[in-house]
Amino acid sequence: MKRIVIFASGSGTNAENIIKFFNHTKTAKVTYVLCNNEHAKVFDRCKKLDIKCLHFKKETFFTSDEILNLLKEQADYIILAGFLWKIPTKIIDAFPNKIINIHPALLPKYGGKGMYGMNVHKAVKENKESETGITIHYVNANYDEGAIIYQAKTALLSEDTPEKIAEKIHILEQRYFPRVIEDVILAINE
């Protein structure tokens, strides 16, 4: 059974969904959630699900090997579920094609630094897109530029607000993210 460590920064709905999904499979198990925001709701979700959740500071992440060492002990795969910091090169190098992110748009559109959450949905609305979706991709040294694993689309109506777009994206994230992670793990380990 493979081990998954999730990085999160916010409410943790995707992290919770992934944890629950893998609680019912023999493919993998979430061993840890790491969070850079001490006030994030993901801590409450992890407590209820009996999953270890660790807060870490920017200095620890970027200048020490503390997080890298924990990952080497606890992770076969790293999942970014609403995590907003760039992953240090030393972690990417230690886990080649084993770090997976989800982005709330159809990359390469609406990717890059600062393009997350409502920033993406507002840009999609402002540009009057007829569709949007999610992109699940490998993580490399650049924001949102890793190889695409999977995309799912949803149609948009002219009256959709950024909040309505966010709801549509959330449905896609909940439906596809855990399954795609499992597919990647199974494909690599066949």
Image (cartoon, rainbow, N blue to C red):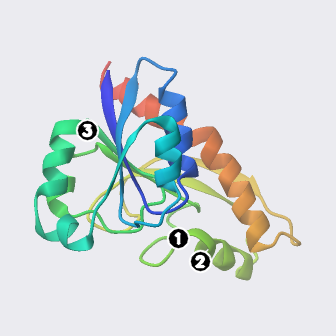
Residue 60, labelled with which disc? none
Residue extending farthest bottom: 126
Judge depth for marks 3 and 2 and give the one in front: 3
Q: Position of residue 105 (x, y in %)?
A: 59, 62
Q: Is residue 180 visible?
A: no
Q: Secondary structure at mark 3?
A: loop
Q: Position of residue 36 (x, y in %)?
A: 36, 65
**Mark 2 touches mark 1? (CB < 8 Å):** yes
Q: Secondary structure at mark 2?
A: helix
Residue 75, labelled with which disc? 3
Foreground residue among 154 and 79: 79
The quarter of the rendered structure image containing the C terminus is: top left
Q: Residue at x 31, y 68 (%)?
A: 86
Q: Position of residue 28 (x, y in %)?
A: 38, 26
The quarter of the rendered structure image containing the N terminus is: top left
Q: Residue at x 86, y 72 (%)?
A: 158
Residue 119, labelled with which disc? 2
**Disc 1 marks which amino acid?**
Tyr
Q: CA distance from mark 3 to mark 2?
A: 31 Å
Residue 112 is left or right of residue 68, and the answer is right
Foreground residue among 165 and 73: 73
- Residue identifier under label 1: 116
Q: Residues within 10 Å of mark 3 (few under 14, many from 20)?
A: many
